[in-house]
Protein backbone atom coordinates (compact mmCIF):
# COMPACT_ATOMS: atom_id res chain seq x y z
CA UNK A 1 0.00 0.00 0.00
CA UNK A 2 1.58 3.39 -0.92
CA UNK A 3 2.53 5.44 2.13
CA UNK A 4 -0.04 8.18 1.83
CA UNK A 5 -2.89 5.67 1.74
CA UNK A 6 -1.92 4.39 5.17
CA UNK A 7 -0.60 7.64 6.65
CA UNK A 8 -2.92 9.28 9.13
CA UNK A 9 -0.83 12.49 9.25
CA UNK A 10 -1.03 13.19 5.48
CA UNK A 11 -2.07 16.82 4.80
CA UNK A 12 -5.79 16.97 4.24
CA UNK A 13 -5.86 18.98 1.03
CA UNK A 14 -3.21 17.77 -1.36
CA UNK A 15 -2.30 18.81 -4.88
CA UNK A 16 0.55 16.32 -5.18
CA UNK A 17 -1.24 13.00 -5.52
CA UNK A 18 0.81 10.63 -7.66
CA UNK A 19 -1.07 8.79 -10.40
CA UNK A 20 -0.08 5.43 -8.85
CA UNK A 21 -1.50 6.53 -5.49
CA UNK A 22 -4.81 7.50 -7.06
CA UNK A 23 -4.94 4.21 -8.96
CA UNK A 24 -4.20 2.36 -5.69
CA UNK A 25 -7.27 3.98 -4.11
CA UNK A 26 -9.43 2.34 -6.80
CA UNK A 27 -7.91 -1.04 -5.83
CA UNK A 28 -8.83 -0.76 -2.12
CA UNK A 29 -11.46 -3.17 -0.78
CA UNK A 30 -14.79 -1.46 -1.46
CA UNK A 31 -15.75 -0.98 2.19
CA UNK A 32 -12.29 0.39 3.08
CA UNK A 33 -12.59 2.87 0.20
CA UNK A 34 -16.12 3.94 1.17
CA UNK A 35 -15.07 4.30 4.81
CA UNK A 36 -12.15 6.57 3.94
CA UNK A 37 -14.27 8.63 1.58
CA UNK A 38 -17.01 8.99 4.17
CA UNK A 39 -14.49 10.16 6.79
CA UNK A 40 -13.23 12.85 4.39
CA UNK A 41 -16.82 13.80 3.58
CA UNK A 42 -17.86 14.14 7.22
CA UNK A 43 -14.77 16.22 7.99
CA UNK A 44 -15.43 18.79 5.29
CA UNK A 45 -19.19 18.79 4.70
CA UNK A 46 -22.52 18.51 6.44
CA UNK A 47 -23.42 14.93 5.49
CA UNK A 48 -27.12 15.83 5.55
CA UNK A 49 -26.74 18.61 2.97
CA UNK A 50 -27.50 17.86 -0.69
CA UNK A 51 -27.11 20.50 -3.40
CA UNK A 52 -29.79 20.44 -6.10
CA UNK A 53 -28.70 21.82 -9.47
CA UNK A 54 -31.19 22.27 -12.28
CA UNK A 55 -29.97 21.87 -15.86
CA UNK A 56 -31.27 23.47 -19.06
CA UNK A 57 -30.03 23.21 -22.63
CA UNK A 58 -30.30 26.82 -23.83
CA UNK A 59 -28.91 25.97 -27.29
CA UNK A 60 -29.33 22.41 -28.49
CA UNK A 61 -27.55 20.37 -31.16
CA UNK A 62 -25.52 21.12 -34.27
CA UNK A 63 -22.21 21.29 -32.39
CA UNK A 64 -19.09 21.20 -34.60
CA UNK A 65 -17.10 19.13 -32.07
CA UNK A 66 -16.99 15.33 -32.49
CA UNK A 67 -17.24 14.13 -28.85
CA UNK A 68 -18.11 10.43 -29.30
CA UNK A 69 -20.52 10.34 -26.35
CA UNK A 70 -22.53 13.40 -27.26
CA UNK A 71 -25.92 13.40 -28.96
CA UNK A 72 -25.48 17.10 -29.80
CA UNK A 73 -22.48 16.66 -32.10
CA UNK A 74 -23.27 17.50 -35.74
CA UNK A 75 -20.93 14.63 -36.66
CA UNK A 76 -23.47 12.08 -35.40
CA UNK A 77 -26.15 12.42 -38.06
CA UNK A 78 -28.04 9.27 -36.99
CA UNK A 79 -29.05 10.79 -33.65
CA UNK A 80 -32.72 11.70 -33.46
CA UNK A 81 -32.45 15.27 -32.10
CA UNK A 82 -34.07 18.53 -33.11
CA UNK A 83 -31.63 21.42 -33.26
CA UNK A 84 -32.74 24.57 -31.53
CA UNK A 85 -31.49 28.15 -31.70
CA UNK A 86 -30.48 29.93 -28.53
CA UNK A 87 -33.47 30.38 -26.23
CA UNK A 88 -34.74 33.85 -25.28
CA UNK A 89 -33.38 35.14 -21.94
CA UNK A 90 -36.90 35.79 -20.59
CA UNK A 91 -37.92 32.18 -21.22
CA UNK A 92 -34.74 30.88 -19.55
CA UNK A 93 -35.16 33.14 -16.53
CA UNK A 94 -38.78 32.03 -16.12
CA UNK A 95 -37.63 28.38 -16.16
CA UNK A 96 -34.97 29.21 -13.56
CA UNK A 97 -37.64 30.74 -11.33
CA UNK A 98 -39.70 27.56 -11.73
CA UNK A 99 -36.66 25.42 -10.82
CA UNK A 100 -36.08 27.57 -7.74
CA UNK A 101 -39.70 27.12 -6.67
CA UNK A 102 -39.21 23.34 -7.06
CA UNK A 103 -36.23 23.49 -4.70
CA UNK A 104 -33.14 23.97 -6.94
CA UNK A 105 -30.18 25.89 -5.48
CA UNK A 106 -28.19 26.28 -8.70
CA UNK A 107 -29.27 26.81 -12.31
CA UNK A 108 -26.91 25.42 -14.98
CA UNK A 109 -27.25 26.44 -18.62
CA UNK A 110 -25.59 24.48 -21.43
CA UNK A 111 -24.95 25.47 -25.04
CA UNK A 112 -23.78 23.09 -27.78
CA UNK A 113 -20.97 25.39 -28.87
CA UNK A 114 -17.31 24.64 -29.55
CA UNK A 115 -16.47 28.09 -28.23
CA UNK A 116 -18.08 31.38 -27.32
CA UNK A 117 -18.29 33.99 -30.09
CA UNK A 118 -18.82 37.64 -29.27
CA UNK A 119 -22.14 38.99 -30.52
CA UNK A 120 -25.87 38.85 -29.90
CA UNK A 121 -25.89 35.23 -28.66
CA UNK A 122 -23.18 35.82 -26.07
CA UNK A 123 -24.91 39.05 -24.99
CA UNK A 124 -28.09 37.02 -24.46
CA UNK A 125 -26.23 34.45 -22.32
CA UNK A 126 -24.84 37.29 -20.18
CA UNK A 127 -28.44 38.53 -19.72
CA UNK A 128 -29.49 35.00 -18.67
CA UNK A 129 -26.70 34.89 -16.06
CA UNK A 130 -27.75 38.27 -14.63
CA UNK A 131 -31.38 37.16 -14.53
CA UNK A 132 -30.61 33.90 -12.71
CA UNK A 133 -28.42 35.72 -10.17
CA UNK A 134 -31.20 38.25 -9.60
CA UNK A 135 -33.38 35.31 -8.49
CA UNK A 136 -30.79 34.67 -5.78
CA UNK A 137 -29.77 31.36 -7.33
CA UNK A 138 -26.27 30.22 -8.15
CA UNK A 139 -25.64 30.41 -11.91
CA UNK A 140 -23.44 28.08 -13.95
CA UNK A 141 -22.91 27.97 -17.72
CA UNK A 142 -21.13 25.57 -20.04
CA UNK A 143 -20.41 27.15 -23.40
CA UNK A 144 -17.23 25.47 -24.68
CA UNK A 145 -13.93 27.31 -25.03
CA UNK A 146 -13.68 30.82 -23.66
CA UNK A 147 -11.36 33.81 -24.13
CA UNK A 148 -10.22 35.98 -21.20
CA UNK A 149 -12.42 39.00 -22.04
CA UNK A 150 -15.47 36.71 -22.30
CA UNK A 151 -14.71 35.11 -18.93
CA UNK A 152 -14.44 38.61 -17.46
CA UNK A 153 -17.85 39.59 -18.84
CA UNK A 154 -19.38 36.47 -17.29
CA UNK A 155 -17.69 37.24 -13.97
CA UNK A 156 -19.06 40.82 -14.05
CA UNK A 157 -22.55 39.42 -14.66
CA UNK A 158 -22.15 37.47 -11.40
CA UNK A 159 -21.57 33.98 -12.81
CA UNK A 160 -20.95 31.55 -9.94
CA UNK A 161 -19.27 28.71 -11.83
CA UNK A 162 -18.22 27.62 -15.31
CA UNK A 163 -18.58 23.95 -16.29
CA UNK A 164 -15.89 22.58 -18.58
CA UNK A 165 -15.24 18.85 -18.23
CA UNK A 166 -11.96 17.07 -18.94
CA UNK A 167 -14.13 13.97 -19.43
CA UNK A 168 -11.37 11.34 -19.10
CA UNK A 169 -7.62 10.86 -18.63
CA UNK A 170 -5.16 12.47 -21.08
CA UNK A 171 -4.15 9.15 -22.73
CA UNK A 172 -7.70 8.07 -23.58
CA UNK A 173 -8.92 11.54 -24.61
CA UNK A 174 -8.05 11.26 -28.32
CA UNK A 175 -10.10 8.05 -28.60
CA UNK A 176 -13.18 10.09 -27.70
CA UNK A 177 -12.58 13.57 -29.13
CA UNK A 178 -10.59 14.52 -32.23
CA UNK A 179 -11.58 18.16 -32.75
CA UNK A 180 -9.81 19.60 -29.69
CA UNK A 181 -7.00 18.64 -27.33
CA UNK A 182 -6.60 18.15 -23.61
CA UNK A 183 -4.38 21.24 -23.66
CA UNK A 184 -7.24 23.31 -25.19
CA UNK A 185 -9.46 22.18 -22.33
CA UNK A 186 -6.84 23.02 -19.66
CA UNK A 187 -6.32 26.48 -21.19
CA UNK A 188 -10.02 27.32 -20.81
CA UNK A 189 -9.94 26.10 -17.21
CA UNK A 190 -7.09 28.54 -16.52
CA UNK A 191 -8.99 31.36 -18.24
CA UNK A 192 -12.03 30.72 -16.03
CA UNK A 193 -9.93 30.68 -12.85
CA UNK A 194 -8.08 33.86 -13.85
CA UNK A 195 -11.43 35.68 -14.07
CA UNK A 196 -12.26 34.60 -10.50
CA UNK A 197 -15.08 32.24 -11.48
CA UNK A 198 -15.49 28.88 -9.69
CA UNK A 199 -14.61 25.78 -11.68
CA UNK A 200 -16.99 22.90 -12.29
CA UNK A 201 -14.94 20.18 -13.94
CA UNK A 202 -15.36 16.41 -14.02
CA UNK A 203 -15.81 13.54 -16.39
CA UNK A 204 -17.62 10.48 -17.67
CA UNK A 205 -17.14 6.80 -16.91
CA UNK A 206 -18.31 3.92 -19.09
CA UNK A 207 -16.77 4.99 -22.41
CA UNK A 208 -14.34 2.03 -22.62
CA UNK A 209 -11.61 3.63 -20.50
CA UNK A 210 -9.45 1.68 -18.04
CA UNK A 211 -9.32 2.21 -14.30
CA UNK A 212 -5.97 3.93 -14.89
CA UNK A 213 -7.69 6.42 -17.24
CA UNK A 214 -10.25 7.17 -14.50
CA UNK A 215 -7.42 7.60 -12.01
CA UNK A 216 -5.58 9.81 -14.51
CA UNK A 217 -8.60 12.14 -14.79
CA UNK A 218 -8.83 12.48 -10.99
CA UNK A 219 -5.05 12.90 -10.83
CA UNK A 220 -5.19 15.87 -13.25
CA UNK A 221 -8.14 17.41 -11.39
CA UNK A 222 -6.53 16.97 -7.96
CA UNK A 223 -3.30 18.56 -9.28
CA UNK A 224 -5.19 21.79 -9.98
CA UNK A 225 -4.56 24.37 -7.27
CA UNK A 226 -7.13 25.22 -6.03
CA UNK A 227 -9.17 22.09 -6.77
CA UNK A 228 -12.35 22.58 -8.81
CA UNK A 229 -15.19 23.65 -6.50
CA UNK A 230 -17.50 21.14 -8.25
CA UNK A 231 -16.67 17.78 -9.76
CA UNK A 232 -19.50 16.26 -11.80
CA UNK A 233 -19.22 12.48 -12.16
CA UNK A 234 -21.24 11.28 -15.15
CA UNK A 235 -21.97 7.71 -16.22
CA UNK A 236 -22.25 7.52 -19.98
CA UNK A 237 -25.78 7.86 -21.27
CA UNK A 238 -25.38 5.66 -24.36
CA UNK A 239 -27.46 7.46 -26.98
CA UNK A 240 -28.63 5.70 -30.16
CA UNK A 241 -26.79 7.08 -33.18
CA UNK A 242 -23.61 8.08 -31.29
CA UNK A 243 -20.40 6.03 -31.71
CA UNK A 244 -20.74 4.88 -28.07
CA UNK A 245 -24.36 3.71 -28.43
CA UNK A 246 -23.44 0.08 -27.78
CA UNK A 247 -21.33 0.56 -24.67
CA UNK A 248 -22.62 -1.66 -21.86
CA UNK A 249 -24.14 0.10 -18.83
CA UNK A 250 -21.84 1.09 -15.99
CA UNK A 251 -21.96 -1.13 -12.89
CA UNK A 252 -23.39 1.13 -10.13
CA UNK A 253 -20.49 0.13 -7.85
CA UNK A 254 -18.07 1.63 -10.41
CA UNK A 255 -19.89 4.92 -9.87
CA UNK A 256 -19.49 4.46 -6.10
CA UNK A 257 -15.73 3.92 -6.51
CA UNK A 258 -15.32 6.92 -8.82
CA UNK A 259 -17.22 9.18 -6.41
CA UNK A 260 -15.23 7.87 -3.43
CA UNK A 261 -11.84 8.51 -5.07
CA UNK A 262 -12.97 11.99 -6.14
CA UNK A 263 -14.03 12.69 -2.54
CA UNK A 264 -10.74 11.47 -1.05
CA UNK A 265 -8.53 13.33 -3.53
CA UNK A 266 -10.62 16.56 -3.51
CA UNK A 267 -12.15 16.61 -0.01
CA UNK A 268 -13.71 20.08 -0.17
CA UNK A 269 -15.25 19.84 -3.66
CA UNK A 270 -18.95 19.38 -4.28
CA UNK A 271 -19.06 15.96 -5.95
CA UNK A 272 -22.08 15.82 -8.22
CA UNK A 273 -23.83 12.59 -9.14
CA UNK A 274 -24.60 13.68 -12.70
CA UNK A 275 -25.66 11.92 -15.91
CA UNK A 276 -26.60 8.26 -15.51
CA UNK A 277 -28.36 8.76 -12.18
CA UNK A 278 -31.66 7.61 -13.73
CA UNK A 279 -30.16 4.13 -14.12
CA UNK A 280 -29.24 3.91 -10.40
CA UNK A 281 -31.59 2.54 -7.77
CA UNK A 282 -32.42 4.78 -4.82
CA UNK A 283 -30.10 2.61 -2.71
CA UNK A 284 -27.19 2.84 -5.19
CA UNK A 285 -27.58 6.63 -5.20
CA UNK A 286 -27.52 6.67 -1.41
CA UNK A 287 -24.37 4.52 -1.44
CA UNK A 288 -22.78 7.12 -3.76
CA UNK A 289 -23.74 9.75 -1.15
CA UNK A 290 -22.17 7.69 1.63
CA UNK A 291 -19.05 7.64 -0.58
CA UNK A 292 -19.09 11.45 -0.78
CA UNK A 293 -21.54 12.63 -3.45
CA UNK A 294 -23.30 15.75 -2.17
CA UNK A 295 -24.95 17.24 -5.24
CA UNK A 296 -27.37 16.01 -7.91
CA UNK A 297 -28.93 17.31 -11.11
CA UNK A 298 -32.54 17.80 -10.18
CA UNK A 299 -35.36 17.99 -12.74
CA UNK A 300 -36.82 15.73 -15.40
CA UNK A 301 -34.22 16.27 -18.15
CA UNK A 302 -30.46 16.68 -18.32
CA UNK A 303 -29.56 18.50 -21.55
CA UNK A 304 -31.22 16.26 -24.12
CA UNK A 305 -31.79 12.97 -22.26
CA UNK A 306 -34.11 12.08 -19.37
CA UNK A 307 -32.90 12.53 -15.81
CA UNK A 308 -34.14 10.57 -12.79
CA UNK A 309 -37.94 10.88 -12.72
CA UNK A 310 -39.22 13.66 -10.41
CA UNK A 311 -41.44 11.22 -8.49
CA UNK A 312 -38.42 8.99 -7.85
CA UNK A 313 -36.46 12.01 -6.65
CA UNK A 314 -39.28 12.86 -4.24
CA UNK A 315 -38.90 9.32 -2.85
CA UNK A 316 -35.11 9.74 -2.67
CA UNK A 317 -35.32 13.07 -0.83
CA UNK A 318 -37.98 11.70 1.50
CA UNK A 319 -35.74 8.70 2.33
CA UNK A 320 -32.83 11.06 3.05
CA UNK A 321 -34.81 13.49 5.18
CA UNK A 322 -38.16 12.05 6.26
CA UNK A 323 -40.79 14.79 6.60
CA UNK A 324 -41.63 13.61 10.10
N1 LIG B 1 -20.29 22.16 -25.43
C1 LIG B 1 -19.87 22.40 -24.13
C2 LIG B 1 -18.72 21.53 -23.68
O1 LIG B 1 -18.51 20.45 -24.23
O2 LIG B 1 -18.02 21.94 -22.76
C3 LIG B 1 -20.99 22.27 -23.10
C4 LIG B 1 -22.03 21.21 -23.23
S1 LIG B 1 -21.47 19.52 -23.10
C5 LIG B 1 -22.94 18.65 -23.53
C6 LIG B 1 -21.26 19.28 -21.34
C7 LIG B 1 -20.82 17.93 -20.84
O3 LIG B 1 -21.86 16.98 -20.88
C8 LIG B 1 -19.69 17.21 -21.57
O4 LIG B 1 -18.44 17.71 -21.26
C9 LIG B 1 -19.85 15.78 -21.09
O5 LIG B 1 -19.03 15.56 -19.96
C10 LIG B 1 -21.33 15.70 -20.71
N2 LIG B 1 -22.05 14.76 -21.59
C11 LIG B 1 -22.46 15.00 -22.85
N3 LIG B 1 -23.08 13.92 -23.36
C12 LIG B 1 -23.05 12.96 -22.40
C13 LIG B 1 -23.52 11.62 -22.34
N4 LIG B 1 -24.11 11.05 -23.38
N5 LIG B 1 -23.35 10.93 -21.20
C14 LIG B 1 -22.73 11.52 -20.13
N6 LIG B 1 -22.26 12.79 -20.14
C15 LIG B 1 -22.41 13.50 -21.27
C1 LIG C 1 -22.09 17.56 -16.63
O1 LIG C 1 -21.01 17.14 -16.18
N1 LIG C 1 -23.09 16.79 -17.01
C2 LIG C 1 -24.18 17.61 -17.53
C3 LIG C 1 -23.67 19.05 -17.30
N2 LIG C 1 -22.36 18.84 -16.78
C4 LIG C 1 -23.69 20.02 -18.39
C5 LIG C 1 -24.57 17.22 -18.90
C6 LIG C 1 -24.99 15.77 -19.04
C7 LIG C 1 -25.49 15.53 -20.43
C8 LIG C 1 -26.03 14.16 -20.62
C9 LIG C 1 -26.48 13.92 -22.01
C10 LIG C 1 -27.62 14.82 -22.45
O2 LIG C 1 -28.63 14.95 -21.73
O3 LIG C 1 -27.52 15.36 -23.56
FE1 LIG D 1 -20.34 19.86 -28.50
FE2 LIG D 1 -20.09 19.84 -25.83
FE3 LIG D 1 -21.41 17.85 -27.12
FE4 LIG D 1 -18.77 18.00 -27.38
S1 LIG D 1 -19.90 17.65 -25.47
S2 LIG D 1 -20.25 17.70 -29.06
S3 LIG D 1 -18.46 20.22 -27.32
S4 LIG D 1 -22.02 19.99 -27.01
Image (cartoon, helix red, strand yellow):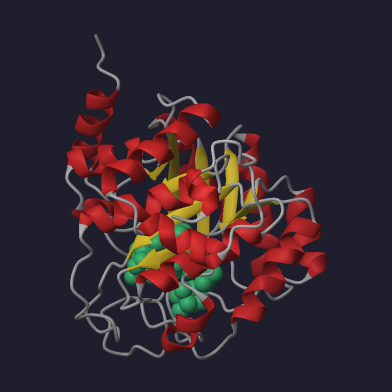
Quadrant containing the N terminus in the rendered view: bottom left
Which residue is at the front of the view, 113 or 249? 249
Quarter occupied by residue 132: top right
Residue at horizontal 65 percent and vertical 60 percent from the top = 223
Which residue is at the front of the view, 264 or 167? 264
- On the image, the x and y values in percent for residue 194 come to 80, 58
The answer to whether residue 57 of the structure is visible from this angle is: no
Quadrant containing the C terminus in the rendered view: top left
Residue at horizontal 58 percent and vertical 39 percent from the top = 268
Residue closest to the far top: 324
The answer to whether residue 178 of the structure is visible from this angle is: yes
Residue at horizontal 60 percent and vertical 79 percent from the top = 182
Task: Note whether 61 is above or below 157 in the view shown.
Answer: below
Which residue is at the front of the view, 70 or 300? 70
- On the image, the x and y values in percent for residue 63 come to 48, 81
Quarter occupied by residue 179: bottom right
- On the image, the x and y values in percent for residue 141 come to 58, 57
Q: Is residue 108 left or right of residue 37?
A: right
Q: Is residue 204 left or right of residue 140?
A: left
Count of marks placed on residues: 0
Residue at horizontal 24 percent and vertical 53 percent from the top = 253
- On the image, the x and y values in percent for residue 300 come to 29, 48
Amino acid sequence: MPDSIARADAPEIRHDWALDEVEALFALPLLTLIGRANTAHQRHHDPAALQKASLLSVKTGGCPEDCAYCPQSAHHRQVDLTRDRLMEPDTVIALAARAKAAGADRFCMGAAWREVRDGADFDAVVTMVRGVRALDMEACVTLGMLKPHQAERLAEAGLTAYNHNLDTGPDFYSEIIGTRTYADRLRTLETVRAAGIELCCGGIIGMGETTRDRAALLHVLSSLDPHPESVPINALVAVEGTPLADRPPVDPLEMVRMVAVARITMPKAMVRLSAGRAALSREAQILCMVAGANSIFYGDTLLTTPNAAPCEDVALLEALAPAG
